Image: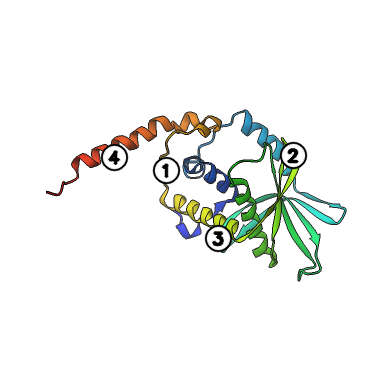
């Protein structure tokens, strides 16, 4: 077994974690995956975006499928796009601007923003320059939304990375109750939240039965 200190968290795991910790563990601990229509469409979109290369746009240089890593947090992966904008205030003369492409619409939770912020943390370590902002492009809306990497989002991101490291180190698959979002999860037939949550309830009931009772 590899040393837990050598384990790195995938950037993609953060989006899974904040959607559902059980889903994240099934994918990244148990190595389970099942494709449905939504995941297939997302994969096809990223196959088009994730072709390594670069091009010039007015006012910036664009790199595609950029490999990222942060040794401080032990997190790594790929950014869909990184734009490099000229910035006289930067010691490098330019500043990275990560852009993450999502197939659907803007989500009510901050999973996508956390994944993007983790990319910024990697870029900061790699280039030695602050990355204050990035963007999410939502394909269903055909629009780009700027994301500010403020102190709250940075703390949320580092907490998520630490939690994913914990699940990987413990090889833990959390038990969660069924929720409305389960219907949108491709792993639902393997996860079986209605069964596993019931198992947790039974275990808790048996534990309470055998616990000593104070007189």
Element type where label 2 sits in the image: helix
Give percent across and percent down for residue 13: 56, 47
- In this view, the residue in front, 23 or 207, is 207
Residue 48, numbered circle = 2
Pointer 4 with pointer 2, Cβ within 8 A: no
Pointer 2 or 3: first along the chain: 2
Residue at mark 4 to residue at mark 3: CA–CA distance: 35 Å
Tally of numbered tags: 4
Q: Which residue is mark 3?
A: 73
Residue with the mark numbered 4:
204
Left or right of 164 on screen, residue 197: left
Query: 132 or 32, which is in the foreground?
Result: 132
The reply to whether dot 1 and dot 2 touch (C-beta < 8 Å) is no
Q: Describe residue 121's horizontal placement relative to residue 26 as left or right.
A: right
Question: How far apart are the alpha carbons under marks 1 and 4?
Answer: 15 Å
- Sequence-wise, which precedes: disc 4 or disc 2? 2
Q: Which residue: 48% across, 60% down?
A: 5
Badge 4, how many Cα within 10 Å: few under 14, some, many 20+? few
Q: Residues within 10 Å of mark 2 (few under 14, many from 20)?
A: few
Q: Nearer the viewer, mark 4 or mark 3?
A: 4
* Label 4, label 2: how far apart the Cα atoms are: 48 Å
Label 3: few (<14), some (14–19) or many (≥20) C-alpha neighbours in 10 Å: some
Residue 190 position within the rendered picture, expressed as x and y whole percent measured from the top left: 47, 31
Residue 174 - label: 1
In this picture, residue 208 sits left or right of residue 167: left
**Number of the front mark, 1 or 4:** 4
Closest to the observer, 97 or 128: 97
x and y percentages locating residue 103 in the rendered image: 69, 37
- Image quadrant where residue 156 sits: bottom right
């Amino acid at each position: 077994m590899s040393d837990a200190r050598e384990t790195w968290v995938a950037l993609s795991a953060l989006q899974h974690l904040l959607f559902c910790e059980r889903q994240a563990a099934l994918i990244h601990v148990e190595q389970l995956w099942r494709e449905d229509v939504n995941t297939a469409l997302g994969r096809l979109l990223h196959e088009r975006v994730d072709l390594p290369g670069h091009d010039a746009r007015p006012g910036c240089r664009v790199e595609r499928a950029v490999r990222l890593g942060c040794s401080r947090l032990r997190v790594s992966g790929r950014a869909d796009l990184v734009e490099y904008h000229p910035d006289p205030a930067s010691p490098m003369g330019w500043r990275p601007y990560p852009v993450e492409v999502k197939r659907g619409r803007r989500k009510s939770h901050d999973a996508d923003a956390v994944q993007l912020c983790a990319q910024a943390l990697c870029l900061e370590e790699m280039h030695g320059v602050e990355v204050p902002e990035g963007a999410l492009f939502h394909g269903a809306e055909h629009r780009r939304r700027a994301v500010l990497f403020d102190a709250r989002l940075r703390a949320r991101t580092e907490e998520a990375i630490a939690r994913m490291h914990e699940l990987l180190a413990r090889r833990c698959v959390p038990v969660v109750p069924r929720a409305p979002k389960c219907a949108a999860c491709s792993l639902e037939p393997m996860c079986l939240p209605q069964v596993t949550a019931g198992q947790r309830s039974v275990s808790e009931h048996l534990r309470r039965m055998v616990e000593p009772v104070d007189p």
